[in-house]
Amino acid sequence: MHRGTKADPRGGIPVRAALSGMAALIATGCAGPPPPPAPPPAPPAAHPNIVLISLDTFRADRMSCYGYDRLTTPRVDSLVAEGALFEAFYSASDFTLPSHASLFTGRYPSVHGVTQNEHALCDAIPVLAEHLAERGYRTVGFYDNDFLSPAYGFGRGFARYDRFSDSRTLRELWETLPDLISASDETPSRLHRLGPLPRR
């Protein structure tokens, strides 16, 4: 046994050697071999259209697709009829900025750091539009809430990210949206079914 090394009373590895081994593991990140490289992205033709609509402070129990007794959301209901309806969905926060930061990063507020209205997303944390753009999507975004502006980091990854603020602009946006999100001339059927102007 080397001088200065404390022996394990059970006859195992000397404590100093064990600590050295642990330090080596920690220094290398304890990760073992690096993970295999990610597969190349699928060609754009294989990508389905993705439309994310965020209705800030909107109550699920006032939507007819969630059982409300009045027909309040017929166009959303038509999407639900052809897609998936999540019956339990929990927000990561109770106000706009951190909850949307979690929606766009897939991380809790304690991880992405946006916990107050004066915080912005860190550039080192990728957002959804960046992931989609890397995989061949043509990304466009429109917002009408100051907390979703590029100043807070939400514009990253979008080829176009603009603010709309009145019904005329919203109507123009809706009528041209299929052309903005698709490189082809085919109008996505679900967008067409929503009608000329989005209404709950």
Image: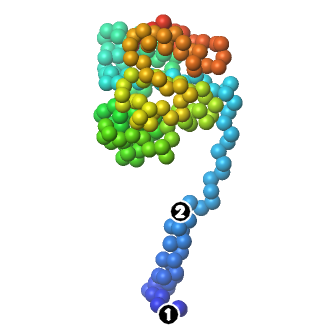
Residue 67 shows which numbered tag? none
Q: Is residue 194 visible?
A: no
Distance from disc 1 to disc 2, alpha carbons, whole Å, reads: 29 Å
**The residue tagged with tag 1: helix, strand or loop?**
loop
**The residue tagged with tag 2: helix, strand or loop?**
loop
Q: Residue at x 57, y 12 (%)?
A: 189
Q: Amino acid at mark 1?
A: Arg
| Label 1–label 2 contact, CB within 8 A | no
Are there few (<14), some (14-19), or many (20+) residues within 10 Å of tag 2? few
Q: Amino acid at mark 2?
A: Gly
Q: Is residue 34 above or below residue 42?
A: below
- Which residue position is annotated with label 2? 29
Position of residue 128 measured from the top left corner of the image (x, y, whole percent) = 51, 35
Position of residue 131 measured from the top left corner of the image (x, y, whole percent) = 56, 36
Looking at the rendered image, the quarter that the C terminus falls into is top left
In the displayed structure image, the side of residue 190 where residue 56 appears, left or right: left
Query: Residue farthest to the top?
Result: 196
- Which residue position is annotated with label 1? 3
